[in-house]
Amino acid sequence: MSKRTRPKPRPEPVLGPEHGPTFAEVIERMALVDKTSGLTRELIADINTAAAEHARVTLAVVSCYTCDAPKACCSLLTSCYLYEAVPIAARLIREGRDTPELRAQLKQRAHAMETTPKKDYKLPCLFLGERELCTIYEDRPSVCGSHLVTSPASDCSDHTTVKITKLAHPSQTTVPPQVDEVFRQEVGLRPLGESYRGALPRMVLLCLEAWHRRDYAAFLAERVLPASHRFEWAVK
Ligand code: SF4
Ligand code: SF4
């Protein structure tokens, strides 16, 4: 009797990115809008708690808590991690604000932020609305929520002044890169050797452009790195 040979298992077909989920589907499946927004809110709350304690101990006053001056801090070069742009992009889509006009403005403003040295940049943020209020306040990136000064608000309008006393907290620089790395792995983004981070309008624009793409990992890897390097040149 001849020995029956067991059929070899068929190899699983290797599916390309065109068969995978879109960026939006991955984000929704993993509830990443709430998760990323929550982590940023938590960080901002912790930094503000530390700032309030610092003010109590040193008898300093955090000017931002009572500031009704024009928001000079919203006309600075503003950085944003890609994971922080996720809740912003989701909000813009949800509120019907993701229009061709907005994308064109984001592109223009991103270019300005990436080509203007920090000391010369002075353009109001695209998300700064009427009465100096942030129109994405609950989803603003951590750098906005943790920009706190104890110098008078009137000093903030002069970006070159040496009088601005900014409160710094170590979490501002240690927590976001850690969250960035976890996010990168969760959504399957390629390692860049550095964070997915750049100018706020660029990160929001790339997020919106990647939203319905299945090849979002390649799309973002190709675009974030050069944009990030341009922004680093500007903030130096
Ligand atoms: S940084 Fe300056 S302008 Fe901005 S909220 Fe604080 S005090 Fe006001
Ligand atoms: S996102 Fe909001 S808080 Fe941040 S710079 Fe823009 S308007 Fe200001």
Image (cartoon, grey):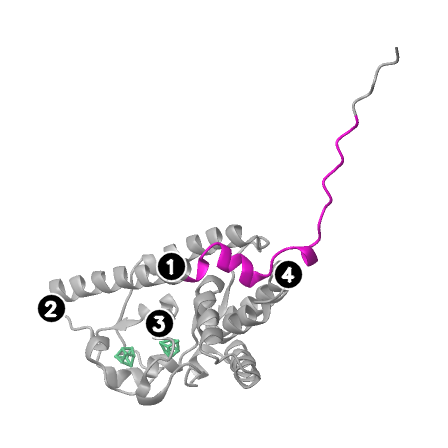
Residue mark closest to the camera, 2 vs 3: 3
Callout 4 amino acid: Arg
For the residues labelled 4 and 2, the Cα–Cα distance comes to 53 Å
Foreground residue among 40 and 23: 23
**Above or below, comparing residue 171 to residue 231 in the picture:** above
Mark 3 CB within 8 Å of ligand 2: yes
Residue 146's spot in the image, x, y percent? 31, 68
Of the image marks 4 and 3, the number of the one nearer the N terminus: 3
Of the image marks 2 and 1, the number of the one nearer the N terminus: 2
Residue mark closest to the camera, 4 vs 3: 4
Tags 2 and 3 touching, CB below 8 Å: no
Tag 2 secondary structure: loop
- What residue is shown with label 1? 173
Of the image marks 1 and 4, the number of the one nearer the N terminus: 1
Callout 1 amino acid: Thr
- What residue is shown with label 2? 59
**Above or below, comparing residue 194 to residue 156 in the picture:** above
Label 1 neighbourhood size at 10 Å, few (<14), some (14-19), many (20+)? few
For the residues labelled 2 and 1, the Cα–Cα distance comes to 25 Å
**Above or below, comparing residue 206 to residue 175 in the picture:** below
- What residue is shown with label 4? 214
Q: Which residues are magenta?
A: 7-33
Of the image marks 4 and 2, the number of the one nearer the N terminus: 2
Callout 2 amino acid: Leu
